Amino acid sequence: MENEVVTGKYSKICSFSEGLAAVRSKKTLKWGFIDETGNEVISCKYDEVHSFSDDMAVVGTFDSDKYEKDLKLYPFLDQYQSYSEKREMFTKWGCIDKSGKEIVPCKYLFFKDFSEGFARVAFGDLKSPGLRHVTMGAMEVEYERDYKYGVVDKNGNEIIPCIYENVNDITLLLKERICK
């Protein structure tokens, strides 16, 4: 019976991870999380979510102000971009814990899932769009990314500031920082 209620309320139910599953509301098209009994424990209020990893979930909100501003400057954006391209370019990322408490506000342009208590993040901007190419009447739009990467911990502290071109090896950066 509970399963019927759950499937009737949500358009998408993802696999469980760490006891919670991401769900997308049919009514609002927003994402939240349910527990293994089907109870919604984190309300459906995010535009994007990742599964829980290391007791944290990366969540995202669509930056409609930035999108509307860019659309006024570049009217062709809406016509030639797919939903996933828009989502990638205009979503701000943060993270929550299993109670739904916001640990890091949705402010980063990039946020990698937590691993061993740390996550890679990036600030920056997407520079003016340009046409990548036109083929048989189809046009692709490409933004140049100007990201600076850093690292946050599970308390929401930016322990390595977002000033680096790359922070792929978090362990190495943390060791360098501790040894200084």
Image: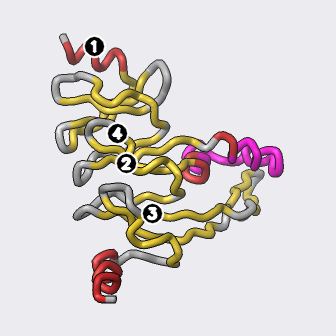
- The CA distance from mark 1 to mark 2 is 30 Å
Tell me the tag on residue 101: 4
Indicate the position of residue 50 as horizontal and vertical percent values: 36, 46
Q: Which amino acid does label 2 sit on?
A: Ile
Q: Which amino acid does label 3 sit on?
A: Val
Identify the element where label 4 is drawn.
loop
* Horizontal relation, residue 59 to residue 178: left or right: right
Mark 2 in CB contact with mark 4 (< 8 angstroms): yes
Query: Looking at the rendering, in which quadrant would you find the C terminus?
Result: bottom left
Identify the element where label 1 is drawn.
helix
Q: Which of marks 4 and 3 is in front?
A: 4
Measuring 37% from the left and 27% from the top, which residue is drawn there?
A: 43
Q: Label 1, on which residue?
A: 5
Measuring 34% from the left and 39% from the top, which residue is drawn there?
A: 101
Identify the element where label 2 is drawn.
strand
Q: Nearer the viewer, residue 135 or 149?
A: 149
Dot 1: few (<14), some (14–19), or many (≥20) neighbours within 10 Å?
A: few
Residue 44 to residue 20: above or below: above
Q: What stretch is highlighted in magenta?
A: 66-86
Mark 1 in CB contact with mark 4 (< 8 angstroms): no
Indicate the position of residue 109 as horizontal and vertical percent values: 54, 57
Mark 3 in CB contact with mark 1 (< 8 angstroms): no
Q: Label 2, on which residue?
A: 103
- In this figure, which colouring scheme has been used for the structure? secondary structure
Q: Label 3, on which residue?
A: 121
Indicate the position of residue 73 as horizontal and vertical percent values: 83, 50
Inspect the magenta stretch and tell me whether residue 154 lies in it: no
